[in-house]
Image (cartoon, helix red, strand yellow):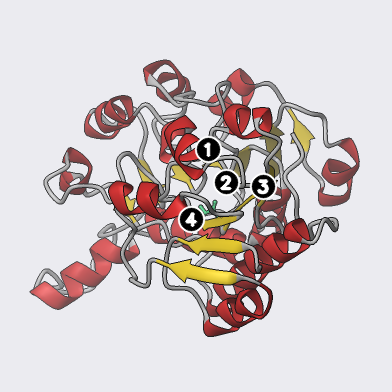
Amino acid sequence: SKPKVYVTRAITTEAMNILEEFCEVSSWPEPDPVSRDVLLENVSGKDALFCLLTDRIDKEVLDKAGPNLKIIATMSVGYDHLDVNEIKKRNIKIGYTPDVLTDATAELTVALLLATSRRLLEANEEARNGGWKAWSPFWLCGPGLNGATVGIVGFGRIGQEVAKRLKPFNIKRLIYHNRSEKAKEAKEIGATRVNLEELLAESDFVIATCALTPETKEMFNDCAFKKMKPTAVFINTSRGGVVHQESLVRALTHKTIWGAGLDVMTPEPLPVDDPLFKLKNCVILPHIGSATIEARSTMAMLTAKNILAGLKGENMPAELKI
Ligand code: GLV
Ligand code: GLV
């Protein structure tokens, strides 16, 4: 009989089609996330799971799935929603979607940086709501990239592509902080590795593109924001969990830093009455880093291909090896 796959969301027809050729597929067919109960019920007895970053895959889900589960493929590059230790213990292979979303996410990071520093959303509000009385010399001014020092925390694929895209803005210095050295990539791009203290103290723009791990969890806390320049702009397109969010609210309220642009936060969705929404110097996007039509369709296909390869005992096109 065909292997059984559960898909936790409505995805592309193209991705569903290639799964259905080889598998018995059932799915949560809605654009909203599957509820925990429905996930637990439907994962039972499956050979493979197609999941998203909104699905927490932990011991409970794995126990519910039972011994047939051999493949978990997430339609994301981030995998902090997966309990990797529990998954590895059970010899389950993990697929994810690196590379195919790098350009889209780097592009969004630059867009968010510019929207934050040049106050685009605030400016649009003013123009629409009658705040625009006349051209005014210092109205809606913010820091520009020309001559700036840019610090990138997490110099992986996405961080590197952000760096490449920012170079033509005539920045003065590109520095990064990364666990491993990345010497070759840094040389090509013209970036210098520094320790975190130095990066925080010297950057006009601090950009987080690191994965959420035990080492990066809440690394942007009171202490980190205090080390930044009062003119600094903080941008986060990685995971909300790398920020201690109350500290960020304090830093923005007391002007410890100039502003922040966030594509990720805690929790998601951020409740509309969250203090972050009350701050004019904070731009908030609803986790759309990889949201180009091309990236998202390719992510869905790659996730399906990871499942098919895994079920056939072949090498996955993108297996998470950690
Ligand atoms: C998006 O945040 C992803 O991890 O793919
Ligand atoms: C993570 O995938 C990164 O590219 O930095």
Q: Which residue is mark 4?
A: 52
N-terminal of the pair, mark 4 or mark 2, is 4
Callout 2 amino acid: Gly
| Residue tagged 1 | 80
Q: Secondary structure at mark 4?
A: loop
Nearer to us in this view, 1 or 120: 1
Residue that mark 2 sits on: 78
Does the residue at mark 2 contact the one at mark 1 (Cβ under 8 Å)? yes
Q: CA distance from mark 4 to mark 2?
A: 10 Å
Give the residue type that dot 4 points to: Leu
Q: Is residue 45 above or below residue 75?
A: above
Label 3 sits on a secondary structure element that is loop
Total number of numbered labels? 4
Of discs 3 and 1, which sits in the foreground? 3
Q: Is mark 2 within 8 Å of ligand 1?
A: yes
Q: Can I make out residue 272 in this image?
A: yes
Q: Which residue is mark 3?
A: 70
Which disc, if any, is residue 95?
Answer: none
